[in-house]
Image (tube, rainbow, N blue to C red):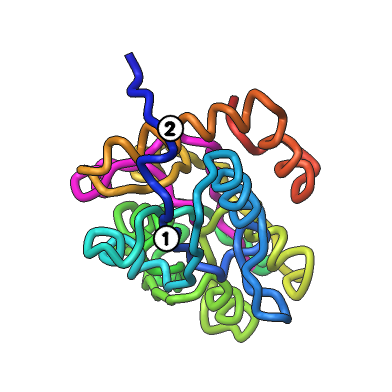
């Protein structure tokens, strides 16, 4: 039976995110954090009557910061996988991430070990996409790691990288629909269903010992699904259904 907890057990929590990942989280011109998961964070806090403080940090510092109590939860498109579960815990997933390679149109690159031999692949450090590329193509391709979610796109535009492997929605919204009109998706669409390295779904990360907080956040996510708030937030940012039932 699921643990039922009272929101009164928690009065204030700190939520960390990497705000370089529009439309999920980014910094607006006025300095405010905005995006799908920012709205989700606010909705959860309102539903659970929690005072929440949102902080921005680079993706590869998020888990260490959670473990050392610089934050209490991570809401930042973080996929569940075995490596992360050895260190932290997760709520139920709220959406599944699909990833794909992107390259310049007409480049003629084939997504295979032979096709990527000698190619330079730009990825964001600390992501499951980076782990997947390192695992599958690390022996044949040159992999370059970047702190921000937008930096690999600059490498593509400059010609310093041949490919990027990333989350389809973010790549399309932040790159292909803007400065990357000369680029296109290539190769298959991949998710955790294809390779466990790519995760079991995106969820809120918490410390292993914070079982009451996990149960509380799961209750909140379930309520937001049932009352339509999750769908409303989804529809604000996406013309398709991203969130999981």
Relative image position of residue 161 (x, y in whole percent): 52, 77
Q: Residue at 54% across / 72% down in the picture? A: 162
Q: Secondary structure at mark 2?
A: loop
Q: Residues under labels 1 and 2: Cα distance?
A: 19 Å
The front one of 168 and 156 is 168
The range drawn in magenta is 76-103
Sooner in the amino-acid sequence: mark 1 or mark 2: 1
Few, some or many residues within 10 Å of mark 1 (<14, 14–19, 20+): some
Residue 233 located left or right of residue 135 = right
Looking at the image, is 22 positioned above or below residue 238?
below
- Residue 87 lies in magenta, yes or no? yes
Few, some or many residues within 10 Å of mark 2 (<14, 14–19, 20+): many
Mark sitting on residue 14: 1
Q: Main secondary structure of the magenta part?
A: loop
Mark sitting on residue 92: 2
Q: Secondary structure at mark 1?
A: strand
Quarter containing the C terminus: top right
């Amino acid at each position: 039976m699921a643990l039922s907890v009272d929101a009164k057990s928690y009065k204030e929590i700190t939520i960390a995110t990497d705000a370089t990942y529009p439309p999920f989280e980014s910094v607006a011109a006025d300095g405010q954090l905005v995006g799908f998961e920012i709205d989700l964070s606010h909705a959860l806090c309102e539903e659970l009557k929690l005072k929440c403080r949102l902080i921005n940090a680079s993706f590869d510092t998020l888990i260490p910061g959670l473990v050392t109590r610089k934050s209490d939860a991570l809401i930042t498109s973080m996929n569940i996988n075995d490596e992360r579960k050895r260190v932290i815990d997760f709520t139920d997933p709220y959406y599944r991430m699909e990833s794909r390679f992107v390259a310049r149109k007409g480049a003629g690159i084939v997504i295979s070990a032979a096709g990527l031999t000698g190619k330079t692949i730009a990825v964001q450090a600390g992501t499951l996409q980076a782990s997947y590329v390192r695992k599958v193509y690390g022996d044949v391709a040159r992999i370059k790691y970047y702190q921000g979610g937008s930096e690999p796109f600059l490498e593509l535009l400059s010609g310093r990288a041949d490919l990027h492997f990333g989350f389809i929605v973010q790549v399309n919204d932040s790159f292909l629909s803007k400065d990357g009109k000369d680029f296109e998706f290539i190769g298959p669409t991949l998710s955790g269903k294809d390779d466990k390295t790519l995760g079991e779904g995106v969820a809120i990360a918490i410390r292993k010992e914070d079982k009451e907080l996990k149960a509380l956040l799961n209750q909140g996510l379930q309520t937001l699904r049932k009352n339509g708030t999750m769908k409303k937030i989804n529809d604000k940012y996406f013309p398709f259904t991203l969130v999981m039932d």
